Amino acid sequence: MRTPPSLASGPEGPHALRPLLDTVLDALGEGIRARGGPLPRGGPKAVAARLRDAVGDVLPADGDPNALHTVVHALAETAADLAASALNPSLDSWDQAPGASELEALVTGALAREIFGGAAPTALTTTGGTESNQLALLLAREARGAGLRLVHGANAHHSVPRAAWLLGLADPVVVPAPAGVLDLAALDEALTELPGPHLVAATAGTTDAGLIDPLPEIAELCAAHGARLHVDAAYGAGLLFSDRYRDRLAGLDAADTVTLDLHKLGWQPVAAGLLAVRDPGDLAVLHHRADYLNADDDTEAGLPDLLGRSLRTSRRPDVVKIAVTLKALGRSGLGELVEQVCDRAREFADLVHGHPGFELYDPPTISTVLFRPAHAADDAVAAVRRRLLTDGRAVLGRARIDGRLWLKTTLLNPHTRPDDLAALLTLVEGNTPG
């Protein structure tokens, strides 16, 4: 039987990380000795080949228990100054992070193929969902022109319309989401009546209730109207790792760009965002020349150009931790974690539904459950949440849907158990005014 993954959020807390320190230090020492100098020998092609051979499949079907040692050893052997914090490369130029730049290419390619399939798509690493959404709008504007009109649901993340403002686009067209998801008839009407070009932004995992817009139907409307499609799947993209839940993302592969944020259903510390891009040609607009970082003759000689991989210049190799997690857990391990939190959410929803003192908004789509004390006024619901926060007893979110205030619990800790859920409900009940 496979040993379950150790998470700092589990019963052992940060102590679960202690044995990993020796692994990291050993791998660093071995890698540095193998390197022998300030930079690895052979140039970009040789470094890329050695790293690919050392790391192997970055997202295997099953996890590799030696992934941390493998990845850190490979990076220490192929980078001049590595250990994000101890290893501290910056992905400005290849010579500052030769191993990390190749690792980023491996990871972003693997995750993009999880969404789009095939061999061509790619992804950019970002600081999170907000930066990914901004990049998606920028790529759409450059592809379709400054007259681009953003169309998004009333359920969209606030960063989507904010990105339109930052880029100087016209005010977005907001499509109603009366059931929490984008209304298809209203979207069709907007695309028919409003002059284009259009960018439709759909959501897979809304902020309030964790709902998923009807992606296949939205993709069909975009194709019929010649609109570009972006899907903000910052929360929901992790369902791709689960054989049991990935069909809830049907239609995602029809998007032009997709936002992921693996600090949610990827269990990464921030920053862990990505923007997956179907057509790598879209990234040509990000190309920028700075002679001290990507001089023409260096690029022509084969040194990789990293400036077109981000709007940032100095940036940490956040891809390292993502690579270790993907390789250590594999699809099966990540899928198991996803299924655990989704199952716990369903159990909590059943608990709420069966309790006469509470009202359930709806069965969860991912791992978010909205509930409220039955017959309580909104100000009482808000007061319960603040009381539990102030007392340090529980952290609950809040969401306003259909004109009513709901308590929100988003289950992301696979170590949560049924007793924890029952205790939470008892806490809320005991702090609700009679």
Image (cartoon, rainbow, N blue to C red):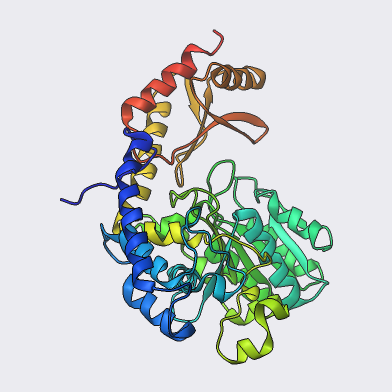
Where residue 45 appears, as percent x and y from the top left, is 45, 85
Q: Is residue 386 visible?
A: yes
Q: Residue at x 37, y 23 (%)?
A: 422
Residue placed most toward the observer, 375 or 200: 200
Q: Residue at x 64, y 71 (%)?
A: 222
Residue 216 sits above or below residue 367 on the image: below
Residue 275 sits above or below residue 53 on the image: above
Q: Is residue 253 left or right of residue 306?
A: left
Where residue 336 appears, as percent x and y from the top left, is 31, 51
Residue placed most toward the observer, 263 or 56: 56
Q: Residue at x 62, y 75 (%)?
A: 223
Q: Which quadrant of the rendered structure holds the C terminus?
A: top right
Residue 23 sits above or below residue 11 on the image: below
Q: Is residue 150 left or right of residue 121?
A: right
Query: Of all residues shown, which one is farthest toward the top?
Result: 434
To which quarter of the image does residue 274 belong?
Answer: bottom right
Q: Is residue 118 left or right of residue 416?
A: right
